Image: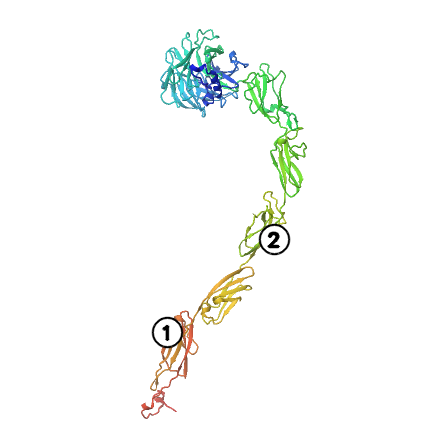
Amino acid sequence: MPLRFLEKMPSVSVFRNILTFLMLLFLSFSSLYLKAQNAPIGCDKTYMIVGVVPVSGDKALTRSEVFEFGSGSTSNPNTGAITCSIQGGGAEGIVVDPDKNIAYMATCCGQSEIVIYDFSKGVFLAPIPIAGEDLLDLVMSPDKNFLYVTSYNGISKVSTITNTVVDYYESPSFNNKTAGLWGIAIHPTTGNVYVSKNWNITGQASTIEYVSPSLTGAATLLATAPAGFNYRGINFANDGSIWAILASDNINIADRMVHYNSLTGAIIESYAFPRPTLNAGIISGAVDAFDLAFGPDGNLYITSYKGDCVTKFDLTTKGFSTFIPYHPGVQGKSIAFVCGNLKCSDCDAPAISINDITTTLGTCTNFIPNNNGTATLSNLLYNATKTIEASIKEGETFGTAPIFGAGANLLLTPGATSLTFTGLKPATKYTIRIWSGSDVCFNDVTFTTPAFSSKVSSSTGSILCGPGITSLSATCAVGVPQWYNSLTSNTVIGSGNTFSFNASSTITFFVGCKPIENSCGVFPANRTAVTISVNTTPAAPSQSTVAGGLVCGAGSLGLKATCAAGFVPVWYDSQISSTVLRTGSPFNVPVTATKTYFVACKDLISGCESPAGSRASATATFNPVPNPIITTSTSPVCAGTNVTLSVTPANATYAWTGPNGFTSSLQNIQFNNIQANQGGIYEVEVSNGLCSANTLINLVVFDRPLGITATATNATCDQDLVKNDGTIKLTGFGSNLRYDISLGTTYTGGKLYATSTAIPVNGVLRADVPNPTIVLQQYTVRVFNANDCFTDHVVAIQQVVCDCGVARCIPYTVTKTKSAIKKELIRTTD
């Protein structure tokens, strides 16, 4: 079934009483499906397309005839006048997609393709092949994404997105196995696909059946035609009821149009076709009717082979009438309606472009256009057989009115080559339509009238830091910038892309574009304000508010500066540098050497800043930190030793502290006869006048062995013999002490604690000291503690002389000899 705008049809019992209400309802109906079915209501221009097949059956001559619908037009379908023909435009089913401005047309006679016609441009697009199928009728899904196409063999489901067959339902799958589907329609509520079966085989049943939109599952039988009749075109009313054509196979019995309940198959009403008035060969209403569609007036329009080309059925009066008379040699088969503009494929309207249009601006009064511009369409050629006429509409598209033949259209007269339109507004889009002979043969061109003035495409103001000369700039897409000192002034103070001015304070100028020379200048609405801002130049920070600092050794320092309110410090590395190191305060800088920085004040809003050369300075001073080192003559030391502590570097100030409240300001300090209680931590602070550093040393002082007494006893005698048993003894000693003894009053032993001898418990160091050979023999005893600290003790052993006593002497005579004296057998006395 062709894609047509479907009217909502009421039931028969109330139809006549509410027809007026329904017509208003048609105007407001917005379902996408209804827009896709039949003719739209309320369209200001509608075309009827009728697919025709020549009686000869020559498929090359199949075409779609276009009629302008409406009794007031110059090509009134009631007269049978054909507006134009779309050659090769199908003849079988026709369906229209108004969103894309295209018509899908099923080709007849085994051509096996759907042709696609762009009726807004009058050209064919690439067809959709349906291989191996002799196509008959087609319909579009409510979402416009699919076409359902009938053929002798079944239903093809075609994607309008890919233009390919995506599904198929074979004819034998229906209840009626007879081949030859024709009519097809989609239920407005359920979306089920209804078809008529066996449209032309006599003696066999013809049915109306339906399947799901997915073309799956079993078909449902709705109605079976009476014997001698075949179903052809079918179409839904908006209430879900269905109208069907019943073609008679007997020339003496009229064809019928039957209205069914689409759910039960019950007949609501039925009407027989009358005998046509122009085909004398028809003796009854057997007109070989084919297709039907709802027109823009809500009535049904039916095509036929042998009767009227198009018959009108008035749903109010229930009467038939000739709408387009019978045409010998051609047969009306399919029908559809198009709302709006339609352009035929054989259109020979003059080709026009914007280059064929010349405009004038017109005049203005006090910056108000008088709207008296003109546009002349040139390079036209008069046609003696076809009227060339044109009209103009404001806007980017022409729309649908006025139509060809309207009284206000401009006619191209013999010898003329141009048409001029007057009363045009400036800076306004217009569309000119030029026709050749009919409303379906036209070309459009859209253009924009010139403007008295326009806004600049860009402009740049200026910011001054203090009074001075500066330049403003502006650019125009078309024309030259014009400069004014106020929004409404008529006086141009400058012309061109730049405008210079010596500004002492902030001031605003206005600029606009004058595309073409005219006396009106730039309208205020098209002027753009461009401002020179004269701002205060901040003073540099006062040197008293700038603070540098000293860093002892490598480190960082926060430089500080204070600006007047509203301004911020900006730091540089020289008086003239343009590279900003930091904005704000403090400015933390690394310090490895003394460096001076410079600071200005800046207005962050205007960008104005203290001039280079006036910047204040802040110095980050680097001073080395002393590295004090303490050296000592000896440590650890034993009490009683002389000790020196020395510190470097020289030429500094020193502050020593130590145990027992010790202080000194000398570089080197001397301890004579140091004692154990003077041992401990000694710390010194060394200052070079700016930076100072501390170091310390632990001076260890060990006690010597104290409280020890050394005594000696002389040798004893055995009668007159010395026994060599002198002793050296220590008392008052502690544990873990050791000793060594050497002759003389000074220790010469050379031993240390580790190599000396432990003191016996009884303190007797020696009990075998020989009797001296001299009157007095001295010994030095050195006592060591574990720290190798020692004390020396000197003891003396006196020579002892032994003799026998008087009581024990026995007289005897001894002969004195030299050998006896020598062997000390005899002691002589003087």
Q: Amino acid at mark 1?
A: Ile
Secondary structure under tag 1 reads loop
Tags 2 and 1 touching, CB below 8 Å: no
Quadrant occupied by the C terminus: bottom left
Find residue 544 and name its label: 2
Q: Circle 1 is placed at which residue position?
A: 759
Q: Nearer the viewer, residue 603 or 245?
A: 603
Quadrant of the rendered structure where residue 744 is?
bottom left
Image coordinates for residue 509, horizontal then vertical, percent: 64, 36
Q: Crowdedness of circle 1 by 10 Å Cα count: few (<14), some, many (20+)?
A: many
347 over 631 or under it: above or below: above
Find residue 257 and name its label: none
Q: Nearer the viewer, residue 401 or 198?
A: 401
Q: Amino acid at mark 2?
A: Ser
Secondary structure under tag 2 reads helix
Image coordinates for residue 86, horizontal then vertical, percent: 50, 17
Residue found farthest to the front: 17
Quadrant of the rendered structure where residue 449 is?
top right
Tell whether 608 sits left or right of 647: right
Quadrant occupied by the N terminus: top left
Q: CA distance from mark 2 to mark 1?
A: 80 Å
Tell whether 518 sits left or right of 658: right
Report whether residue 697 is seen. yes
Tell whether 27 sits left or right of 449: left
User: What is the count of numbered marks?
Assistant: 2
Image coordinates for residue 407, horizontal then vertical, percent: 59, 16
